[in-house]
Image (tube, grey):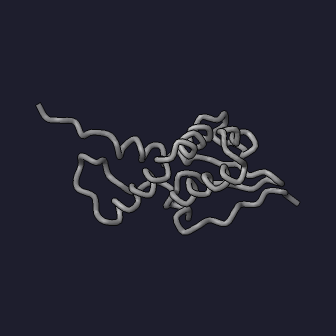
Amino acid sequence: MSNTKVLPLSESEAPGTAAPCCPPLAERPFTAEEAETAARMFKALGDPVRLRLFSAVASHEGGEACVCDISDVGVSQPTVSHHLKKLREAGLLTSERRGTWVYYRVEPSVLAAMGRLLTMAPTAV
């Protein structure tokens, strides 16, 4: 029997919804739904502790990090858990429980979508 258990996903973490759905800012005005999605993402990353945690997961070897490897960000463990939950709710991280530890991943599609969102369209000469 395996000790691996996938944590329950919130609605925002369901497969296929991990990546922000928004086009590049300069492409066209956002719809109300796209603006909500982008705002959730930016709000989650607007906290320095969350940004550090997101960066720690994104840059960790193998593309995933155990909470035990990334929790040294200057706040208590319950606060780390709170911030990781906010990142998961925003669709920026996914998580999986393995035994007593939880492992976090940044979906590659999330990083790609974030890059596209902030990319300026090439200007015609």
Q: Quadrant of residue 95?
A: bottom right
**Location of residue 58 in the rendering, given as x and y in whole percent from the top left corner:** 58, 39
- Point out the image quarter for the C terminus: top left
Residue 84 position, x and y percent, is 62, 52
Question: Given the current orientation, which residue lies at the most extreme right position?
Answer: 1
Please name the residue shown 56% across and 46% down the image.
50
Which residue occupies 45% across, 53% down? 43
Residue 118 % position (x, y): 34, 42
Residue occupying the far left of the picture: 125
Which residue is more in the foreground, 16 or 32?
Answer: 32
Q: Position of residue 80 (x, y in %)?
A: 66, 49
In the image: residue 40, left or right of residue 15: left
**Residue at the extreme top:** 125
Q: How many marks?
A: 0
- Residue extending farthest to the bottom is 11
Q: Is residue 37 left or right of residue 54?
A: left
Q: Quadrant of the N terminus?
A: bottom right
Q: Is residue 105 above or below residue 1?
A: above
Task: Identify the residue at horizontal 41%, vertical 59% (top origin).
Answer: 37
Left/right of residue 29 with respect to residue 54 in the rendered view: left
Quadrant in the rendering for residue 53: top right
Residue drawn at x 39%, y 55% as measured from the top left = 38
The answer to whether residue 36 is above or below residue 50 is below
Q: Measured along the vertical axis of the image, is residue 34 above or below residue 54?
A: below
Q: Nearer the viewer, residue 24 or 32?
A: 32
